Image (tube, rainbow, N blue to C red):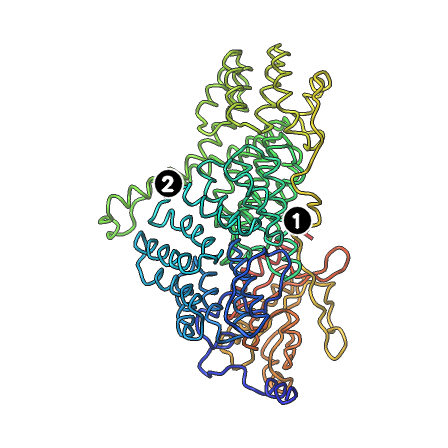
Amino acid sequence: MKRLLLAFLLTAPLFADDDTPAGHSTHGEAFNEGPRQQAYLIPGMGNVTFPVTTKVPDAQLFVNQGVAQLHSFYYFEAERSFRQAAALDPDLAIAYWGMAMANVNNEKRAKEFLARAEKLKDKASPRERLWVNFLTEWYKNSSGEKRARAAIKALEAIVNDFPDDVEGKAFLAWACYHFNDKGLAISSHQAVESIIAEVLRANPMHPGAHHYRIHLWDAEKAGRANESALKFGPSAPGIAHAWHMPGHIWTKLHRFDDAAQHQEASARVDHAQMIRDRTMPYQIHNYVHNNQWCMQDLMYVGRVRDAVAIGENLIEIPRHPKLNKIEDGGHASREGRSRLFEVLSKWELWDELLARSETYLAPSGNDDDEVKRLRATGAAHFAKGDREAGEKCIAGLEALEKKEREKKEEPKKDEAKKDEPKKDEKKKDEGRKGKLKPIENALAELRAIVEEDPKAALEKFGKCDDLRKEVLARAQLRAGEKDKAEKTAKQAADGAEGQAIPLAWYAEILLELGKKKEAGEAWKKLAPIVRHADRNLPVLKRLEPLAAEIKVELPADKPAIDQIEKLGPLAWKPPLAPPVNVDGKLLNHKFGELPVLMIFYLGSKCSHCVQQLGKFAAVAEEFSKEGIEVVAWSSETPEQLAKNSAKYPFPLFADPSLKIFKEYRCYDDFEKTPLHGTFLIDADKSGQARIRWQDISYDPFMEAPFLLAECKRLLSFR
């Protein structure tokens, strides 16, 4: 029987419907996106039990795992778990309910999955039907208060009919939080806390209860979530978000060292998963947000080297035209660069900043980013005494200012714009002002720094709206305004509780004012903050004589997270590439030695694939000039491939068994069909082949010129 089934799989058509485009799901549009590779049981997802009606034990295990992942907002993997449950038991309504829940932020897909769950309700238990009904009530109502009340009422029905269903109470707490900014504000935080407390009495390490408690009190009374901040990570140690969320609480409580350790743990868990599953950072929800925040908290406590390593890593991360591009302010490269400018400038590491100004911090082609670059490098040049280079930065900012002012004043180009509503014009004008303000601030600061007259410099600093108070205090002291300098420096330190830099500058200014006793008191507050700080940071170096005189006894050092290194590496690096074998021999090109662009396509009958090959053929010579070899793998037989191989300026290889497709995960494990894939493979310093860029999808990657530029950028980091 197994042989007959294998024979069928090898000879059956790839697609059940001839009208379905190659790579697309035969089950519908919702199944195109999301995970296409099978799930496995992952340690550390959380202790959650969600009983369902199934005769397949593994289906129950994947449902449990999926629900646990939902509680930690690990939505992509939760969908994978529920897809696996559905593959094991196609009649399991809750599997499709779970897929809908995993798409709480994508209503279109959620409704498609819910429709399948509705069709299978008759095969489910009364309790499971109530869970499906919860989503039905949710989505049959329009957004806003009506939807929120319907969903919460449906959850209350589960809690009422099945009072021992811990998950009913857990998701009720989640819904109260979820709908808080979607039409139904929380009227009593204490009432929601009571629901969470009930869940924790039944399961003290329930990941969802700890998660929702953190969200509940984050913007209210952060201290109320102390216990959950300690327990959320250990309750789901294999999920990065479980380590990230406690950072919210520790940051609010000004415990920046603890916050940084938890965000570091989050990054390490993400990196372990990426290595394990060969995923790209831009495929991970919350990844950039966590890492840039981690950099900030590391900066606050003086762990500069680690902050810089994370920033450089964010810049090295592959860019994708849809998922991670420099034009988007919230994406990896922009966030990494912004934080690097901030960390290196605030800690006065001018040599390190300038050393990176032509590599990691080289011009990016984005004007907003260029303003930050010119401001930071200008300050560095002036601090190093290189006035000429600093003046060039000012000139660069002046050119950007002129460009923005010309945009603001340019006449309307067509008559239609004359009738544009006034509010639209006002909005555009505000946007232009928003672009100008950072340039004006940067110019004000640099012009003040280079001004030799202390009084005139102070006046120019006054034109900078975002000037740090500690910088202003230094300028006031230089201008002879001693009382103002002390007051400003104290305000800076008091307003940044738990942060090292303002407090260190305050101590230094007190010393310059001859107030050694007060400086000593400031050092006593600073010492525990910088206990893990890097050595030889300029301002801390200047305070060493004070530190030697004012001895501060610190309690025994106890890390917030024991053996944090075991969670995974601090920085992401490209995953290892599977070896490419043909008939037991390595492919006859310098694979692993020379960069290779590998394209997986679904045959000459796939019109989109033919279009993709044409686009890459048009720039194949450009890839070659950069030392990058282009090769393509087809799902066709060698005989079919021979008919088309002469059309393209790069070699085509046949993989009718889909062996190499599967090794590179260009394969839908659920539907047993190949997928499109594009990869940049290169060797690391040890000679191991690694995947530096990838796109696996139901559609082929078409943007060849973008990928050529991105390959050049990525290979510059070798």
Left or right of 283, for residue 409 = left
- Residue topped by disc 2: 432
Left or right of 397, for residue 261 = right
SS of the residue under disc 1: loop
| Residue reaching furthest to the left | 419
Residue at 45 percent across and 38 percent down: it is 219
**Label at residue 571:** 1
Q: Amino acid type of disc 1?
A: Ala
Q: Position of residue 125 (x, y in %)?
A: 45, 70
Residue placed most toward the observer, 344 or 436: 344
Q: Position of residue 118 (x, y in %)?
A: 39, 71
Identify whether 331 is placed above or below 701. above
SS of the residue under disc 2: helix
Image quadrant in which you'd find residue 622: bottom right
Q: Quadrant of the N terminus?
A: bottom right
The Cα atoms of the two marked residues, 1 and 2, are separated by 37 Å
Identify whether 207 is placed above or below 576. above
Residue placed most toward the observer, 571 or 620: 571
Residue placed most toward the observer, 34 or 153: 153
Q: Position of residue 413 (x, y in %)?
A: 30, 50
Q: Amino acid type of disc 2?
A: Arg
Left or right of 305, for residue 30 = left
**Label at residue 280:** none
Compare marks 1 and 2 and give the one earlier in the sequence: 2
